[in-house]
Image (spheres, rainbow, N blue to C red):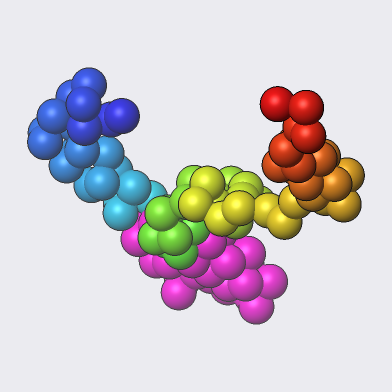
Amino acid sequence: MLAEEFGWVGVAVTLALYLFVTGRCLWIAANARDAFGRLVAGALGLSMFVRPGRGDGGAGARRRAPALKRRASRHERRMRRRSEVRDPHA
């Protein structure tokens, strides 16, 4: 959607800002005075780096893929068999 609206330049600017913020978090983590600061800044930077790389936007793992069909319930199978039975009076 971003590429459709702003083109290659918009994507390049967004990617540059994203990499700058991630790099800045990791730089802060490397120069932190205590272990807690390193952990917080490093975790924030790495979570920002890894999350968009998955490509699902955070919701893809929770949704069922449209190509996968669910198994029909017992009721659905029974109704299908009833509709397949031919009418003896026809």
Q: Position of residue 13 (x, y in %)?
A: 20, 38
Label tally: 0
What residue occupies the far top of the structure in this picture? 5
| Residue farthest along the bottom direction in this orientation | 35
- Is residue 25 visible to the viewer in this orientation of the structure? no
Left or right position of 6 against 64: left
**Quadrant into which the C terminus falls:** top right
Residue most extreme to the right: 75
Report if residue 10 lies within the magenta region.
no
Looking at the figure, which quarter contains the N terminus? top left
Q: Residue at x 75, y 51 (%)?
A: 72
Residue 82 higher or lower than 89, as above or below: below
The relative height of residue 7 versus residue 52 in the rendered view (above or below) is above
Residue 6, percent across and down?
A: 18, 24
Q: Which residue lies at the image location 41% right of the left edge and 54% below the top edge?
A: 55
Q: Is residue 51 left or right of residue 2?
A: right
Segment colored magenta: 22-48
The answer to whether residue 32 of the structure is visible from this angle is yes
Q: Residue at x 20, y 38 (%)?
A: 11
Is 27 left or right of 12, judged from the image as shown? right
Residue that lies at the very extreme toward the front in this rendered image: 89
Residue 21, position as x, y percentages in the image: 38, 50
User: Which corner quadrant of the image does residue 5 belong to?
Assistant: top left
| Prevalent SS, magenta region | helix
Q: In terms of depth relative to the viewer, which is nearer, 7 or 86?
A: 86
Of residue 43 and residue 9, the one placed in the foreground of this image is 9
Query: 50 left or right of 6?
Result: right
Residue 52 percent location from the top left of the image: 42, 54
At 62% from the left and 48% from the top, the residue drawn is: 63
Of the pair 67 and 82, the residue shown nearer to us: 82
